[in-house]
Image: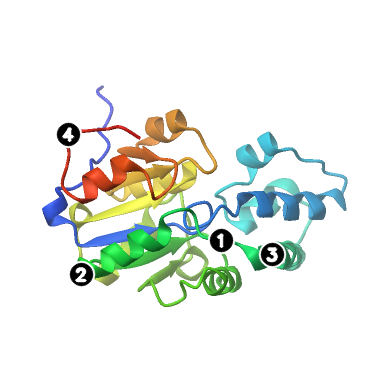
Amino acid sequence: MMPTPHPSLPDRTHLAAILYDLDGTLANTDPLHFLAWQDCLQEFGIEIDEAFYQRRISGRLNPDIVADLLPQFSVVEGQQFADRKEAKFRERAVALEPLAGVRSLIQWAETQGLAQALVTNAPRENVDYILQVLQLDRSFQPVILSEEIGIGKPDPTPYKEALYQLGLRPQQAIAFEDSPSGIRSAVAAGLGTIGITSTHSSQQLTQLGASLVINDFTARNLWFWLEGDHGTTEP
């Protein structure tokens, strides 16, 4: 049985919207999340390194992470633990900077009349805080939160919800993602997906279905595509 082909990037002339992940995509938040998880889990005798973080934590919803790592917790205890972890993260995120080129892309999309939405597994308090720190709190509409629709990435529902609210087909939008769960979610929703190597390798993101892989939003191959030059794949 032949594997199902991954969706490709749409024809640039048909592009109507850009959908962005938050953590690891708009800003490199993973190092801060790693430290916050490390601090909180140490209290329960769980030592983690970056490999453990990438394998068991990155890109997942907090309730799933807590149930996996601290199964002794009740739902209420698990939420209290996650709240403490996120508070530690926000303490460290006060000086967070957007990934290189983010503002240029958002401004370019505005001049092109493209819709721009945020699709994230992050909790509401983090989303509001990070967007304010990055000064991007008025840049995205809609903002789709997995916790508010009841299911998160890697399920495609968050991206499908964004498309539904925008009134668009998958072939009219692209997604930017950095994590395996995010790539899987966007690809399963039928979106041409651009992977960002802030947290995982180019090879991993390509294998998961990314049509294009970039280091950040200044990448020449991204702008060649956006501006209509499809003859190169140079990073």
Which amino acid lies under the numbered mark 1 shown in the image of this protein?
Glu
Distance from Cα at disc 3 to Cα at disc 2:
35 Å
- Mark number displayed over residue 113: 2
Please tell me which of labels 2 and 4 falls first in the chain: 2
**Quadrant location of the C terminus?**
top left
Q: Residue extending furthest left?
A: 13
Can you tell which quarter of the image residue 88 is in? bottom right
Q: Which residue is rendered at x = 34% and y = 64% of the image?
A: 106
Describe residue 7's horizontal placement relative to residue 95 as left or right.
left
Q: Secondary structure at mark 1?
A: loop
Q: Secondary structure at mark 4?
A: loop
Q: Which residue is mark 4?
A: 231
- Mark number displayed over residue 86: 3
Please tell me which of labels 1 and 3 falls first in the chain: 3
Label 1 close to label 3 by CB (< 8 Å)? no
Describe residue 133's horizontal placement relative to residue 172 as left or right.
right
